[in-house]
Amino acid sequence: MGAENRFRQSRKSGFGLNEVYSFEITEDMEGERIDKCLALLMDSLSRSFIQKLIKEGGVTVNGLAVKGSYPVKTEDQVSFRLPPAVEPNILPENIPLDVLYEDRDVIIVNKPKGMVVHPAAGHYSGTLVNALLYHCGNELSGINGCLRPGIVHRIDMDTTGSILACKNDKAHNCIAQQLKEHSITRRYHAICHGVIQEDGTVDRPIGRHPTERKRMAVNEKNGKQAVTHYRVLKRFRNYTYLECELETGRTHQIRVHMASIGHPLLGDALYAPNRKAPFSLQGQTLHAKILGFHHPSTNEYVETDAPLPEYFSHLLEILS
């Protein structure tokens, strides 16, 4: 039995704050950095959160604190404790939300273009988190730390559409597990450069760009598996309207994959810097339309459909 399966069995009820968890390293993880090892086992926690946990001595190997670069060995005994939830040091803001679905466990919002999902350098107000704190009060999961309460997945600032946030840790762990197992339905609508003749799939690993920090790239050597299925909805003279379904969920996945086959998204200044966008667009033409998942409490399948934003519908009319 692999380390991940053993670890799952040891935490059947999911992660709890301020509880100690332990597991043993097996041969399949030999040589991995401890921070990468924990990131693989705990998809619901961000890599930066794990690195901070290690730096503060919250992770031990064989009873001793280690650095994030420590290469694990077979039979190493790893223990860690998730700290108690910290009150967010960010302020609730009365920002209107387009709520597609909400109950006591989750909330799904149709995010507008230009809204950052969570606070980060240069964006400490006006984010989705600021709006959720006002709308939900204290009813947000604390697993991802004080800057990302409730956040279990993200979409880019200039991507519109469905994003799900969790109101408690049980829901957070459940949704994170579904994301890890690729069982969540995520279908995006996009407009790309060029005319695509047939439906297809891009199955190419994605990792950090070797020289440009803000970009991702197809990386056969160090990238993680990434699969995008695309279906032609309508063809125009110089563009194609697509539906893209994510099998995996890597950073900038659709943008990177479509650029890699010579069809970057219309308006994408990062991955199509030399392609002119004649419609005064703000970033890539990409919309998270369909989001489907199994409910954390009932296990019933729930699916939402975020209507296209006005700019997107207007652009389709112009192209037609």
Image (cartoon, rainbow, N blue to C red):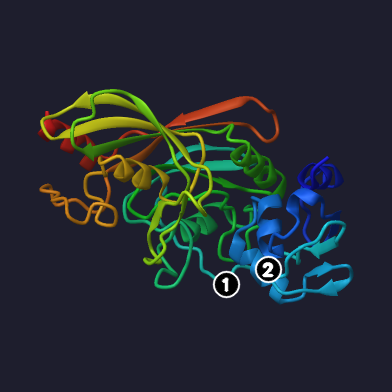
The N terminus: image quadrant: top right
Q: Is residue 142 visible?
A: no
Residue at left offset 47%, top offset 68%: 120
Judged from this view, the residue extending furthest toward the front is 221
How crowded is the residue under tag 2: few (<14 C-alpha within 10 Å), some, or many (20+)? few
Label annotation for residue 198: none
Q: Position of residue 317 (x, y in %)?
A: 14, 31
**Along the line of sight, the residue nearer the viewer: 309 or 8:** 8
Please say if the residues under marks 1 and 2 sit with CB atoms less than 8 Å apart.
Answer: yes
**Along the line of sight, the residue nearer the viewer: 298 or 189:** 189
Q: Is residue 72 visible?
A: yes
Residue at left offset 70%, top offset 57%: 37
The C terminus: image quadrant: top left
Circle 2: element type: loop
Q: CA distance from mark 1 to mark 2?
A: 8 Å
Q: Amino acid at mark 1?
A: Asn
Asked if residue 28 is positioned above or below residue 228 in the image, the reply reads below
Label annotation for residue 89: 1
Q: Would residue 168 be found to the left or right of residue 284 on screen?
A: right
**Along the line of sight, the residue nearer the viewer: 57 or 29:** 29
Q: Position of residue 74 (x, y in %)?
A: 83, 57
Q: Would residue 166 be found to the left or right of residue 210 on screen?
A: right
Label annotation for residue 86: 2
**Along the line of sight, the residue nearer the viewer: 28 or 23:** 28
Circle 1: element type: loop
Quarter of the rendering containing residue 21: bottom right
Asked if residue 168 is positioned above or below residue 162 in the image, the reply reads below
Residue at left offset 89%, top offset 70%: 63
Q: Amino acid at mark 2?
A: Val
Q: Position of residue 218 (x, y in %)?
A: 41, 49
Quarter of the rendering containing residue 62: bottom right
